[in-house]
Amino acid sequence: MPIANPTKWYCGSTKWSAITAWATGASISAGALRRQNATPTVNNERVFVAIVAGTTHATTEPTWILTKGAKTTDNTVTWQECTGQPGINGDTTNSPVWAASQAATLGQIIYVSSNGSLQICTTAGTTKSAPAPSFSATAGTTTADNTATWTSLGLASGFGAWAAPHSRIKNAETATWMANGDTCWISDNHAETAAAALSMYTTGAANLPKYFICVDDATAPPTAVATTATVTTTGANTITLGSASGYQYSYGITFSAGSGAVASRVLCGNNVGYFENCTFAFPGTSGSTTGNINSGGGNYNVFKNCSWTFGATSYQLSFRGGRAEIINGTFAATGSVPTTLFTADSGNAAIAVVRDSDLSNISGALMTVTQAGNTWLEVLNCKVHASVSLTTGTASGPANNGVRMHNCSSTTPNYVIRNGFYEGTLTHETTTVNNAGATDGTQRVSWKVITASTVVFPSPFAVEQIIQWQDTTGGSKTATVEIAGAGTLTNAEIWMELEYPGSSATPIGSVVSSRVADLLATPSNVTSSAASWGGSPAVTQKLQVTFTPQMKGPIKARIYISKPSTTVYIDPLITVT
């Protein structure tokens, strides 16, 4: 077994920039920290610690060896790569400690509590059996440890908080540094920028995701989270967050892709990703583009307390397969407001839920449904614009895209419901209502269904379930749901299916239907009703089935309508007699 590697890592672009840069002809003490002087290429930013004191080269910066733990000779100084490790960032709490008969890896820094020193492994090997070596607290002193060698970096107290962090999240997250399950603490002043496309979060494991958390950098280890770290690309460059093997949790980071008169986008393609208090910005001001909320059939992304901003009204967010959940989200609070917020991706199936979110800036449509995919979007308990429409475009078939919006409004009612599918639409209604029907305590409510011209008997419009608790058993019951409309409907054009607990031995459900029983028989008119309705509908009818419940429990009525281009009002209340 090896000595434990760090599980906490430090990253902060401004903190890295504040490290003293290498200089020519400088006198260097053992334990001194330096960064490159010449600007390194992106993701090659490193921190080096002097393990042999001396004087740097008089004219030329050394060719730094960037490999983790590697040594670089610089005239009479020897440097060793040490980026991001907790001990030299002022954090002894999370620094590994010595262990007997274990593998020590090159560049690994341990904390020795007996004398308060840090030691860096300068020769990889296997540590001795107990007791521990007698480590020195004097910087530059080496200690033989069986086949391993350690060099003292001096007292841990000589290294301040955030003294040697990574400059970029991408570099910290690589398997060379962060192992699966590790945490990268990101400075609240972190502001990394790239002038090229950026791909991040490509590693991790389902049971050991990697954690990227923005924190207050006043102390090490940090004691408070923050929300001000930024990752930015310029020009027409995309930020891609995740891959087929990426599993991660991110907190408090703003991802801003692109700048200027370009199309810009952030793509979330994690296998599993959880983003909390993050912002996704699309500041480009030209063209049309989509940013993936998820990407691929195996993906599951969760966004909690996150926000999205846009630089052009033509931008959209795409569901490209898998599952996505947005909780307490905010959209277009600043910048441009998309004409249509979401779109489905052709050929990919997605299940998406947006709940408890502020969509009130979107006055156009929520989702384009034209693409030949099958994305089902549920919008639950949200604040929406008074004029927002559910969909734009026409779904190409019954298995294609649709939107369910429940309890979403710009004002106070909590009975609001709107569904938009290939087979038609459903909305709440407060004028044409059963005067003895469903109510929120003040307002009578019905459901208004308008079927599409393409509805047929095998693919009817399926109305939301009406659920009611049934508290008696053993006797025959009649369940009734009142309906109204412009004309008389038959039991082949509209019917009710009731699911109920029909067994006393198991919870298996039983289903009874009012649909015409013999598909070759002539349909009959649905029973007329004497119920009083507001709005003066021409015809009132009632759907009825008889059932005998064998257990107490919920009964669930679902109504199906197969007559095309028809408007039906449904009282969402089951009466049981």
Image (tube, rainbow, N blue to C red):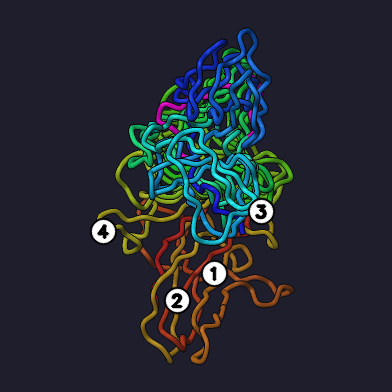
Residue 511 location in percent, x, y? 57, 78
Looking at the rendered structure, the kind of residue marked 3 is: Val
Q: Nearer the viewer, mark 4 or mark 3?
A: 4
- On the image, numbered disc 3 is attached to which residue? 455
Looking at the rendered structure, the kind of residue marked 2 is: Ala
- On the image, numbered disc 2 is attached to which residue? 479
Q: In this view, does 239 lie to the left or right of 96?
A: right
Residue 359 location in percent, x, y? 43, 37
Q: Which residue is drawn at 45% across and 65% down?
A: 466
For the residues labelled 2 and 3, say whether their Cβ atoms are less than 8 Å apart: no
For the residues labelled 2 and 1, say whether their Cβ atoms are less than 8 Å apart: yes
Q: What stretch is highlighted in magenta?
A: 185-199
- On the image, numbered disc 1 is attached to which residue? 496
Quadrant for the C terminus in the image: bottom left
Looking at the rendered structure, the kind of residue marked 1 is: Met
Q: Nearer the viewer, mark 4 or mark 1?
A: 4
Say which element carries label 3.
Answer: loop
Residue 562 location in percent, x, y? 63, 59
- On the image, numbered disc 4 is attached to which residue? 441
Residue 368 visible from this viewpoint? no
Residue 300 location in percent, x, y? 59, 51
Q: Which of marks 2 and 3 is nearer the N terminus?
A: 3
Q: Label 2, label 4: how many angstroms apart (C-alpha)?
A: 22 Å
Q: Label 2, label 3: how many angstroms apart (C-alpha)?
A: 26 Å
**Circle 3 crowding by C-alpha within 10 Å: few under 14, some 14–19, many from 20:** many
Q: Earlier in the sequence, mark 4 or mark 1?
A: 4
Q: Label 4, label 3: how many angstroms apart (C-alpha)?
A: 35 Å
